[in-house]
């Protein structure tokens, strides 16, 4: 085994996403042993010292900090991984860029288009490597969808539709603010649009190209919730649900829906693409499967194929087990980390980066403006 | 067996829908033997004599005609069943109403809101019994959905979504006009909106109440097609695809999509309803199943139930076979015919009637206007 | 329409199977208008006069009888359809054969191999046309499976497995005898073996050839049930469940299971065939679908195809609706009746006939003997 | 974080199972941080030095060896993990037991009942802790099945059926011996019986109790294959397929099938249990789902529930992500390792251990004897 080049990670934010990213780094060595670069878990940071300490021990970080600026200031850190709530993405990113650190930012890029633009400018000016954790692209079935599209098997695209349905906020006792920051517009920027539709839009533009204009509707079903910090009942500022249709630049129609009020769905993220010659669909809750309909099959025996994407000649699966044996959600992060490390060696651009996430943000912004103004909006893409 | 009261049918239009309706009438006696009324197939009418003759023999009509006005003029006819292309619905209906005949009209009610309004007025003035063949309500799984909703099991409704996807017009060689009248805006009135979304809207308003406003987009992917009658390449006037979101009066968000360009789908009509306490979904291609998620189930064993709606205590199924044995598409017409006949005996209102179909037409009209003007439209309901 | 040759039916037994057959005959004219022969419902027979009268009116029989011998004695009857409990199949068949009538016998052919042999001999001697209602062969998806196999797409066959699972006798209050004759070994001959496995075996030998030897186990979970006729608790003589494995003559292994104690299954009849190059599977509860796995598909996009067998170029479906619209259980009988009538015109042999059903009986007999003796048995095929 | 007690692992065999176990150990610290014991990867052993070195580096072992006896001889090793081909299980286990090491043995326990018995005796005499890697018990959906059964929800059990279908040996070019040792009866002991059915039997007896007697059939479809070591065409000694039915001690019927000749199946391990009141089924290829039919549901809305076993109150899932996000195959090993470590702290017995695996071996032995003698065999359980 040749000596690895180290990418020394400083992780800021020790919540759920901190877990998924840390796990992603930890497993690179076991499953991608041929990479030239290896992540090294240098420091984990949380404002809460107890949490920072426990997290760093659990995940194998060499040290911990309670001030994110201290992390950026350290010389022994190559990359800043931002797992904080959305309201800190811009400030940390810009500081990290100025400090010349690589940046791995959790999605969405920021709360607003303005913040996003500053971030994109910051990394452009400093020239630091950057990526955004739109992780679902790298589930094997989704990557296979990309391969199928690029092979030309679908032909001209007519329709793209996606939804991301959850049900966890139906309960009126769910609060906003504090650890429920996803419910707080000040911190999150938006509701399902930035949290869930952003994923759908990232995948969609990766698979089907740019979105030109959108027409949206949003809804907030529960208008007031107790705020964790103030303890008071306060108006809810986020969108509980968002639906939009749109035109892609390739002439296809798009349809997107997200909600946290779809009883029976936990993480029901699906997409379907209908082309002239074939169609594809996928569902996160059965993430190892891709469904594929090929009109060129003999008509008597034509039907949707349920492809169990677990064979060694399917994307990423040579790294894992044997045919028929499933992988899970976490692999999306491992694959993204591995591909980023690979890009360091190859010198090739990595995507999704800040620029890509900025494009997604443009669509999100147009969606929210469309819903507010009850009119079509162009995305500027 | 007591002597039956006869409902003597004059059927106008010997195409696909003529078949489905005739089959519906023919089977009443075998499967609904207790009804007081029995349909009698008196006359079938087509402009093409050979077709009229063959059809009447095949389906057991006592006679045939080639002029629909002759059918209406006959004294031995109680009910006119209109299975013509859409452009004849209004004229025939109005004439039949004036002649005091019951009217069974194929959907959509007409090409336009104006035509529809005249038809509604005509039946209101004459007082004739009337119904419209929005047949899907009466598939057992759909009726079961209605029962579940009425039982209160869903609670407050947040979302209603439906789509109707086909792929038969992707081929550029499909013509418009003549026997391909569904492709001809002059005859059909619209494309997928009147043909497919009208079904979705009828079911939706039956299950979830009125739709207040809509925001739509339509697309015509293939702009010119050869016209069967003229033999010339002519502009296509219909909508190949239509998507809209909307508000229901009960506060829920609606999402509807239809297209004939979704490769891999033949008659993929699905709906899903998300309530506070439970959700329901259904798919025409697996029409004997209803899926039901009940949040009140114990959390460890909670999941979507796949209900095979074939038991005797489920809607209509006591008329058919034994548990586990499927019925098909055609039963929707048989059930509608039977329920209409039952309403004659009970004196209760039958739905969907012209008034109901007029409401659906209002939504369709708002949808098309919204798409044309790129703005929200109210339905007037 | 040319003048039809009539096949005048005398139906004996007005229960559930009487309904399915009568419906089959009634719909021939509508859906198979080109056949040269047309069934005419001449007489229905039940020992219970009220039942016979009501049944004949409901299904359109011209007359009724209460003595089956009177039916056979009538000159205006061409074909005897036997829908009685199993214990009458032999006597009626033999009498009908002697009278020179065509015979359509409900499955299984008889209670025992001895009875079956006499029946086969009787039709052989008299030379009358005969068929047995192993109806599932003629569901479009099952016939499509036959086409796929005959095309050679599967290659060498390794495995055939089938099961038929129900749950209706779990309740200890279900009785035996009388209308519950399927629970009475005297009348039925056996339990699930003759009632359910016989279907599986008929399909299996049609698709995969003869079965050479078998090793079986049976179980009777509830040992005593009240007898409807005597009113007394009596030992249960039938098999509640039966499992067997076997060798087909083509070298493949077979596996069959049937039970009426599989909670959650009403009519769960499935089969799967694994060949060197492809596999097929089917499920009666979703009868319009055939699943097909073709190993020759490109490996990256290989998967089980769910074929919705509703297109006009798939078996029988040109007779029905349009692509995507389902048919039901009843079509199996209509198709069998139509094919039989077609065979009268073409002069070709019809299958399944008494001889084919005798072969199935041989397997059933070997299965029951194997279970009783706890040893392998050859079928004699 | 309190100081952990170390369990220093010596892993013998650096193949596929070496990977799965090593991954299992590596992730304990991250996902089960509260355990008192922590595995420490001390040494990995392979006869091939290059392989041993690379494997130890990749998986984080502190050292490597090429002689398994050296591993056992080391003082700094607490537990021997046996991942060799089956023919080495007995010798290594017995040596490890004598050396007082804990033993974690890959399944099946051994090639034969005799070997297994010696192993059981060895660990009994030495008193060392032991476990066998029947890992599927600890997939959350399978453990949930166990909970449901233990809750009494199923009532009296009538049927247990399981199969494990693969297709990787259909190709006649697959060899036997060497790295294809699973094809070599000398090394593997048997074919699918020990490799695949052993898994099914372990789960079955865990969920449904002991198996009393069996009746089996086996088949070897390809009779000769080239041997990797000799390079010659040699007779194939393993069973390519095995089917058996059986009686469980609780009175239920069992049905098991395994093959490597089922085209379209990679790792299709399924089981279904039918009880008086409810039924359960599961499929390894969709391992996050458990299907559950509860007859006590209201009859109109009764159906199989598809439970997505990813909520925090379902087995093991509080350790992972959030509801709706899947885990994979590998978690089965992590959970087993964690539970074993927990048993060290609690002092409770761990299962499956050598004794449990010996019971499974008794069933396998009876199955193979039954197939060879074409007669029923008792298992001795």
Image (cartoon, coloured by chain):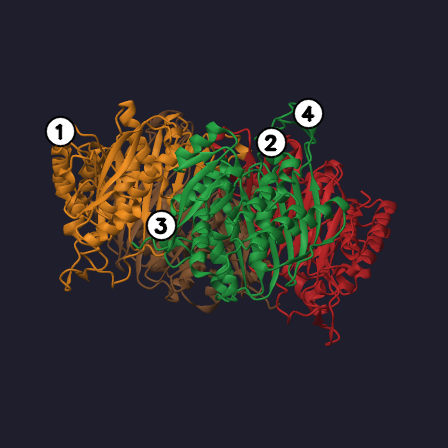
Chain colours: A orange, B brown, C red, D green
Q: Which mark is residue D31?
A: 3
Gap between marks 4 and 3 measured at Cα: 48 Å
Gap between marks 3 and 2 measured at Cα: 43 Å
Read off the residue under disc 4.
D233
Count residues near mark 4 (Cα–Cα under 10 Å), then give few for <14, some for 14-19, many for 20+.
some
Question: At which x and y percent is residue D27?
Answer: 38, 45
Q: Secondary structure at mark 3?
A: helix
Q: Secondary structure at mark 1?
A: helix
Read off the residue under disc 2.
C277
Q: Locate the C terminus of chain C by quadrant.
A: top right
Q: Using the image, name the chain to which the residue with label 3 belongs.
A: D
Count residues near mark 1 (Cα–Cα under 10 Å), then give few for <14, some for 14-19, many for 20+.
some
Labels 3 and 2 share a subunit: no
Tell me which corner region of the image, top left, top right, bottom left or bottom right, holds residue C85: bottom right
Tags 1 and 3 in contact by the CB under 8 Å rule? no
Count residues near mark 3 (Cα–Cα under 10 Å), then give few for <14, some for 14-19, many for 20+.
some
Question: At which x and y percent is residue D199?
Answer: 57, 48
Read off the residue under disc 1.
A126
Which is nearer the N-term, disc 4 or disc 3? 3
D226 over A324 or under it: above or below: above
Labels 4 and 2 share a subunit: no
Q: Using the image, name the chain to which the residue with label 4 belongs.
A: D
Q: Using the image, name the chain to which the residue with label 1 belongs.
A: A
């Amino acid at each position: 085994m040749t000596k690895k080049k180290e990418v020394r990670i400083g992780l800021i934010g020790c919540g759920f996403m901190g877990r998924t990213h840390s796990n992603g780094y930890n497993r690179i060595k076991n499953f991608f042993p041929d990479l030239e670069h290896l992540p090294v878990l240098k420091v984990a940071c949380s404002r809460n010292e107890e949490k920072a300490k426990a997290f760093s021990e659990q995940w194998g970080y060499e040290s911990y900090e309670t001030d994110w600026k201290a992390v950026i200031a350290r010389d022994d850190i190559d990359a800043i991984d931002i797992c904080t709530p959305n309201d800190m993405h811009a400030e940390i990113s810009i500081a990290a860029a100025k400090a010349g650190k690589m940046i791995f930012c959790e999605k969405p890029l920021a709360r607003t288009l303005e913040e996003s633009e500053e971030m994109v400018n910051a990394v452009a000016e400093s020239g630091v490597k950057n990526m955004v954790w739109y992780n679902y692209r790298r589930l094997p079935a989704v990557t296979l969808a990309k391969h199928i599209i690029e092979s030309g098997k679908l032909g001209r695209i007519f329709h793209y539709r996606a939804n991301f349905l959850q049900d966890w906020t139906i309960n009126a006792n769910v609060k906003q603010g504090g650890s429920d920051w996803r419910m707080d517009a000040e911190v999150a920027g938006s509701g399902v649009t930035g949290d869930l539709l952003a994923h759908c839009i990232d995948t969609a533009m990766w698979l089907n190209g740019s979105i030109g204009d959108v027409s949206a509707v949003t809804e907030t079903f529960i208008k007031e919730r107790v705020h964790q910090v103030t303890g008071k009942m306060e108006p809810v500022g986020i969108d509980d649900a968002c639906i939009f249709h749109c035109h892609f630049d390739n002439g296809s129609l798009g349809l997107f829906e997200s909600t946290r009020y779809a009883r029976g769905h936990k993480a029901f993220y699906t997409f379907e693409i209908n082309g002239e010659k074939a169609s594809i669909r996928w569902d996160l809750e059965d993430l190892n499967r891709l469904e594929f309909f090929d009109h060129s099959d003999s008509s008597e025996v034509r039907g949707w194929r349920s492809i169990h994407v677990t064979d060694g000649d399917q994307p990423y699966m040579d790294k894992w087990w044997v045919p028929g044996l499933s992988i899970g959600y976490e692999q999306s992060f491992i694959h993204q980390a591995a591909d980023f490390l690979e890009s360091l060696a190859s010198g090739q651009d990595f995507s999704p980066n800040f620029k890509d996430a900025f494009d997604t943000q443009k669509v999100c912004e147009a969606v929210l403006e469309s819903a507010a103004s009850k009119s079509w909006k162009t995305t500027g893409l």
